[in-house]
Image (tube, rainbow, N blue to C red):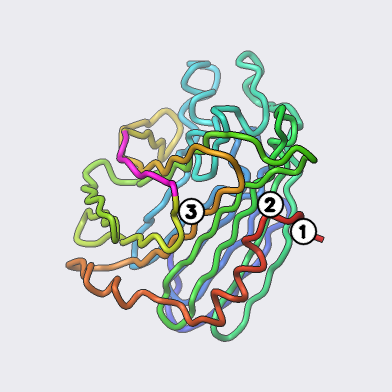
Amino acid sequence: MMARSGSQSDSSFVPDAGLHILHHDETYIIMDAGGNAHNDHLSFEWFAAGRTLVTDPGTGVYTADYATRNRYRSTRAHNTILVDGEELCRIDPDRLFTLEDDVQPRVLHWSARDESTLLVAEHDGYRRLAHPVMHRRLWRLDHATGDLLTGDLVYGVSAQGGGRHSLELNIQLPAPDATIEIGAAATVARWGGGGFVIRPLDALGWTIAQVAGEVSPSYGVCYCAPKLVYAWQGVLPARLLLCWRAFDGPAEPDAMSRFAEPADVFEALAGWMNDQPAI
């Protein structure tokens, strides 16, 4: 994707592709609501500071290698939350171009204002579990700073509560030579003279690690690239609120100490990050 020049905001929805695009100046966030044969519901890509920072894994291959095809379309391959190791939509390994119809995503809120763009969506793919749960996710793009705020909420929807679950959020980087520094206050990823910083704002009980991932920029072309994995285990609900900042040139982690949102923003977002079903 090529960035456009000039100061502009033209966030949009592409219904045929199931895509919502948050855009301001040189920053794009693309949210996928699903609709293809990949388990990418509520996954996203992030382009800022002249480069792709968080990427979709791509296709890999089709019929040439069933295992590779299914691996690239799995939930774990995408930038979304995996619950209890279960696929969002069940995969028949012999049916390479279809998934079980287990997920009904919906957009709860979509607004583009002068100061920010906010998108909130959720899906019900894990209602089929013994203790059924929902996954809600929000993205807020700050137009003044270009900072991205993401929030994940996984909550139970049965009378017995959410129950005990394990959660896994994968974040795929595009660059095989990326280096990652994981710290308590911030995580920094660098490659090619730039990168991004993530600061956890609400990450109680979550751990973070670097693991090997895979990227396929075009058909039949596959290579290893690092990814970040946030993991959580316990009784729901679970929340994860992260602030993301892109940089071009030397990273300035000290600036993350000034990475704060106004109190009214947190108050507004709190309404979307509770464990009550949306009306």
Query: Is 110 situated left or right of 229 in this image?
Result: right
Q: Nearer the viewer, residue 232 or 115?
A: 232
Q: For residue 216: magenta? A: no
**In whole angstroms, how far apart are the C-alphas of marks 1 and 2?**
9 Å
Q: For residue 206: magenta? A: yes
Q: Residue at x 59, y 76 (%)?
A: 267
Q: Which residue is mark 1?
A: 278
Name the kind of residue labelled 2 in the image: Glu
Residue stretch rendered in magenta on the structure: 205-211
Q: Is residue 112 above or below residue 66?
A: below
Q: Residue at x 45, y 72 (%)?
A: 4
- Dot 3 falls on a residue whose secondary structure is strand
Q: Nearer the viewer, mark 1 or mark 2?
A: 1
Q: Which residue is mark 2?
A: 122
Q: Position of residue 19 (x, y in %)?
A: 64, 55
Image-quadrant location for residue 121: bottom right
Q: Residue at x 72, y 58 (%)?
A: 107
**Which secondary structure is most common in the magenta stretch?**
strand
Q: Which mark is residue 45?
A: 3
- Dot 1 falls on a residue whose secondary structure is loop
Residue 1 in view, yes or no: no
How packed mark 2 is, by other alpha carbons closer than 10 Å (few <14, some 14-19, many 20 or more), is: many
Query: Is 197 situated left or right of 89 in this image?
Result: left
Residue 231 in view, yes or no: yes
- Dot 2 falls on a residue whose secondary structure is strand
Q: Is residue 71 above or below residue 4?
A: above
Mark 1 and mark 2 lie on one chain; the one further toward the N terminus is 2
Q: Is residue 34 above or below residue 267?
A: above
Mark 1 and mark 3 lie on one chain; the one further toward the N terminus is 3
Q: Position of residue 156 (x, y in %)?
A: 70, 43
How packed mark 3 is, by other alpha carbons closer than 10 Å (few <14, some 14-19, many 20 or more), is: many
Q: Are marks 1 and 2 in contact (CB under 8 Å)?
A: yes
